[in-house]
Image (cartoon, rainbow, N blue to C red):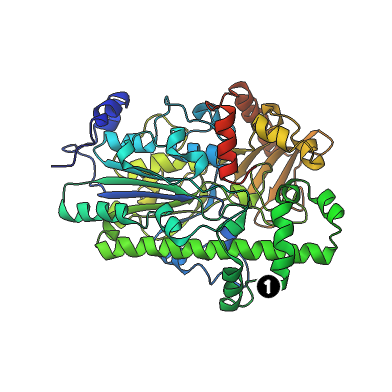
Amino acid sequence: MRNAFHACTALVAAALPTALLACGPGSSAPERPRLVVLYATCTLNKEYLSPYTTRAEGVPYTPNFQRLADDSRVFRRHVTEAGQSGLAFASILTGTQSDRHGIYHHPSKLGTENVLMAEAFAGAGYDTWFWSGQPMAAASLDYGQGVVPAHTFERALPFASEVQPLDDEFLLRLTANDDEFDAILAHLREDPDYEAYVQVCFTATHEPYHQYATPDQVLAFGERFPGHGGGVTRAEIERFLPIYEAQRHELNFDFPDTAAKLGLTPADVERLGAVIEAFYKTAVYNLDVLLGLFLDRLEASGLLDETLLVFTVDHGESMYRENALFHWTHGLQLAPEVLDVPLMIRGPSCGVTPGDYGEVTRSIDVFPTVAGLCGIAAPSVDGVDLAPALRGESEPQRLLAYSHTTTWGEQRVRRFRRLALLQQILPRADPALMWARIRDRDLVFKLSRSTDGEFVVQAFDLEQDPGETTDVFDAEDPEHVLMRERLAAYKARLVQRYDPASGLTEDEALERLKELGYL
């Protein structure tokens, strides 16, 4: 018999819609995978992954991402709700956006009135597990609803006044390359009636990037992948890494003034950017190795083709881009490299065939799609079940993707009040200062705040202009006018439903922010 979900299954099931429970054993639902894995990392710019890059030189240092992509449906226009983890993971796990799930900034607790993906799978008879390795989307912030404490492995990132690279053992545990995951695979092999849902949420590429890559690894990366390490030398690392470490937030959020104060020449800026990017690329390479180990575990178990494996990202990351306001960060601007993120779904037993999915999809579509592929009805969500399109039963829908910037908690507003550029853009914790974006295929429409305090509407064609250098908004075009109205209505709804409460004390919030390097 299927393993019971401990004492809390009945409580979770009682709270779910009847339609969810109708797909359990004995129903007429299609055969479903015995293992479902949501493998979701953080702060990953898809241009650094070989399945997604548009760079002429390609990306040879992510072979395991390519290995996964070769057997998966690869979503080419997948969009996240926001460039901040608390919001973005809430969107993935609930299938709703901020005006419903309630997260506008992190750290915040996710309200228990939300129904999460793990709860849906628990209610349908799956044994649920959570590798909780992202401090802003942690089980202790209620992102693990539907998973009992004994099945939750919360991996707190060690905070120190000086950044210390994480050791290999910690990174293995962070990414479910451990004995606990092996035990689940063993149970699946031994018991043909056992089903498991595994949720792995972590970060291995978040700034400060040298937490995930050492100088020696960066130099070795440059030697192994000539042309991809930026020609960075040890002398440059020794010069620029201390500058980055000491002035990281100033470089992120007030770059023009900081570069001037530090006396950085254009050549210095170029080499500083090369050093920082080399650390980021090396961290991505290390992540690829960890993904490969996870895929190896599934393959060695003989369960890979019985597994529905979903890989996605909460948000991307900006490196240095001259026309961007903020560099080496995320969350406070509507940058395509932050909002347009990877999604790959591997599920041969669910009827998912390899190939590309070209229409726009959203983080809110992940929950209903995964549930749909498993024959489980999702609760009321904002997203769309893409399973029929993935199985070839219907044509892909043309969807609009709505995204917004974060508000900031009072702790960060106070901490960064000294930064002039940031103060112009985000002087207070106020939802009226949020920016909004709509993506319609390759056209994006933005409502953003300029440095003079005025909100303006712009449009960009990402196919022709991925760096967003040319505004193509046309106030005489009825379609553009409609998008402007939609932006205004979307933002108004967000502002109307904003609740500043985070559910955390001041000390708890500060501890979380320090853990991820925000303070």
Quarter of the image with the N terminus is: top left
* Residue at screen point 49% across, 61% down: 287
Residue 495 to residue 94: above or below: above
In the rendered view, does 466 fall on the left or right side of 308? right
Label 1 SS: helix
Going by the numbered disc 1, the residue's amino acid type is Arg
Quarter of the image with the C terminus is: top right
Quarter of the image for residue 24 reads: top left
Where residue 283 appears, as percent x and y from the top left, is 55, 61
Front residue of 418/321: it is 418
Residue 41 to residue 93: above or below: below
Where residue 392 appears, as percent x and y from the top left, is 36, 52
User: Residue under circle 1?
Assistant: 234
Where residue 155 appears, as percent x and y from the top left, is 44, 47
Answer yes or no: is residue 448 visible: yes
Front residue of 291/63: it is 291
Front residue of 92/20: it is 92
In the rendered view, does 412 fall on the left or right side of 149? right
In the rendered view, does 190 fall on the left or right side of 76? left
Quarter of the image for residue 6 reads: top left
In the rendered view, does 73 fall on the left or right side of 230? left
